[in-house]
Image (cartoon, rainbow, N blue to C red):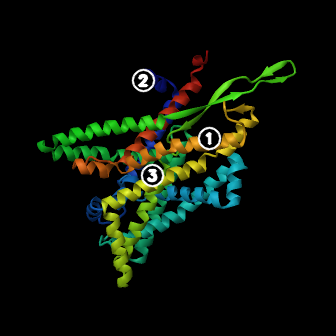
Amino acid sequence: MLEKITQIFKIKELRNKIFFVLAMLGVFRLASHIPIPAVDVEGLKNFFEGNQIFGLLNMFSGGGMDNFSLVALGVGPYITASIIMQLLTMIVPALERLQKEDGEAGRKKINQITRLLTVPLAGLQSYALIALLQRSGVQVLTDTSAWGVATTIITVTAGTVFLMWIGEMITEKGIGNGISLIIFAGIVSAIPKAIQQTVLNFDSSKVIDIVVFSVVAVVVIAAIVFITEGQRNIPISYARRVRGNKMYGGTSSHLPLRVNQAGVIPIIFAMSIMIAPGMVANFLVNVNNPTVAKIAQTIADLFQNELFYGVLYFALVVFFTYFYTSVTFDPKKIAENVQKNGGFIPGIRPGRPTAEYLHRTINRITLTGATFLGLVAVLPFILKIFINMPSLIIGGTGILIVVSVVIETVRQIEAQLVMRDYESFY
C-alpha cells in the first residue's frame, strides 16, 4: 500500500489529477456552507433533524439543504434527469437506437440531453422545496415576494449546474466518477459532526451500544466489499480455426458475472420513489379541501411509520436491482457476441440455449445481490431495534455508497498506475 502511494506521488500527471479532484471537492464543501441570504438557518436545521424523508434528502445534498446553501439540491436533479433518460431509452425507439447504434457519439448526445433536462428539473425542485417547507410550517425565506422567490430559485438552480460541471470535470480526469465523489464527500462530511456529538454527549451507560455499533459497522463494510467484489466466472472456450497455414483459437477464457451487477443505482432509484409520496403528501396536508387534506395526512403518517417505510424500501430496492440488471445485462446479445467470436460455454449449445443459461444464472446471482442491497438499505431501522445511537448512524445507504465509491476510485487509480508501470508487463 505504501509503495503504491509513493508511486502515485512520483508520477506528476497522476499527482496533479488527484490534487485537482481534492480541490474540486473542497470547492463543493465550501459552497455547501454558503447560505442563501434571507434564510432562517436555525429553523431549517431543527426541521431536517426531525424528519427522516427530508433528512435523507439533506444527506445526499451534502448537508447543503439544512442551511439552504448555494448547492441546496446537490446533484439530485442531475440524478433524476439521468434516471428519466435511462427509462426513456427503453421506451423511445429513437433514443434506444442513439444509445446502441451510434456508439460514443450517441452517448454524448444523450449526456447533453441529460444536462439540459437537469436545468428545468432543478428549477422545479427548488420551487417545490420552498413551497413544501413553507406548507410544513418552516419559514424558509424572510423575503417571500415574487422577486425574492425567483432569485432564490435561480441561485439554487445555478448551484446545481455548477456541481454538475464540477462532477464532469472530475470524471474527465479519470479518478473516479465525479457525481459519485460529490455524493461521497457529502456523506463523509457528516462523520466528524456525528463523532463530535457522541463525544460531547458521552454517557457511560451507552458503552455497550458504541461497541455493538462499531462491530456492526466493521462487519457491514466487510460484507459490502465482499459482495461488491464477488463475481461468478462463466467458462468460455473458443474452437480452433485454421486459416492458411496458421491455427487460431483453442483457448479458454471466462465471462465475469458480478453478484451486485447494478451497483448503488437500485438504492438511488428506490430512494427517489420513496421520497416522492411523502413530499407530495406534506405539500397537500394544509390544503382547503378536507378530503384531500385527510388523505394527504394519512399518507404522510404512513410514510413516517418506520415498519411500513422499511418494508416498502426493501421491496423497491429488490425490484429495481432486477430491473436495472435486466436493462444493463442482455443475455441474448452476449450469447450472440460469444458465438460470433467462435466461443461457447462447455456443455451448453451456442445461441438460444446459451442466452437462456445466462438468463437463469444472472437471475440467481442477482437474488443474492438484491437481498443484500435491501438489507443494507434498511440497516438503520434494524439497528434502532437493538441500539439507540441515531447520531452515529449514517445509514446503510450512505455506507454502501461510500465503500462502493472508494473501491471504484481505487480501481481507476490502480489502472492509471498500471498504464505507466511498463516493467510489470515483462
Could you tell me how far apart the alpha carbons at marks 2 and 1 are, in whole angstroms? 37 Å
The C terminus sits in image quarter? top right
Residue type, label 1: Leu
Categorize mark 1 by other alpha carbons within 10 Å: few (<14), some (14-19), many (20+): many
Question: Is 208 on the left-hand or right-hand side of 105?
Answer: left
Q: Residue furthest front?
A: 347
Residue type, label 3: Ile
Q: Residue furthest top?
A: 426
Question: Is 300 on the left-hand or right-hand side of 390?
Answer: right
Tell me, for residue 267, which label it has, or none: 3
Q: Is residue 159 visible in this depiction of the protein? A: no
User: Upstream in the sequence, badge 2 or badge 1?
Assistant: 2
User: Upstream in the sequence, badge 2 or badge 3?
Assistant: 2
Q: Is disc 2 placed on a helix, strand or loop?
A: loop
Question: Is 102 on the left-hand or right-hand side of 39?
Answer: right
Kindly report which numbered mark, 2 or 1, lies closer to the viewer in this rendering. 1
Could you tell me how far apart the alpha carbons at marks 1 and 3 are, in whole angstroms? 25 Å
Relative to 137, does residue 206 appear above or below in the rendering? Answer: above
Residue type, label 2: Met
Q: Give the residue pinned by disc 1.
A: 358
Q: Give the residue pinned by disc 2.
A: 1
Residue at the (58%, 50%) spot, across then down = 326
Relative to 25, does residue 158 appear above or below in the rendering? Answer: below
Q: Is disc 1 placed on a helix, strand or loop?
A: helix
Q: Residue 54's x, y, as percent?
A: 35, 61
Question: Is 30 on the left-hand or right-hand side of 242?
Answer: left
Q: Residue 258's x, y, as percent?
A: 53, 38
Could you tell me how far apart the alpha carbons at marks 2 and 3 are, in whole angstroms? 31 Å
Q: Residue 367's x, y, as percent?
A: 49, 45
Categorize mark 3 by other alpha carbons within 10 Å: few (<14), some (14-19), many (20+): many
Residue at the (21%, 50%) spot, across then down = 388
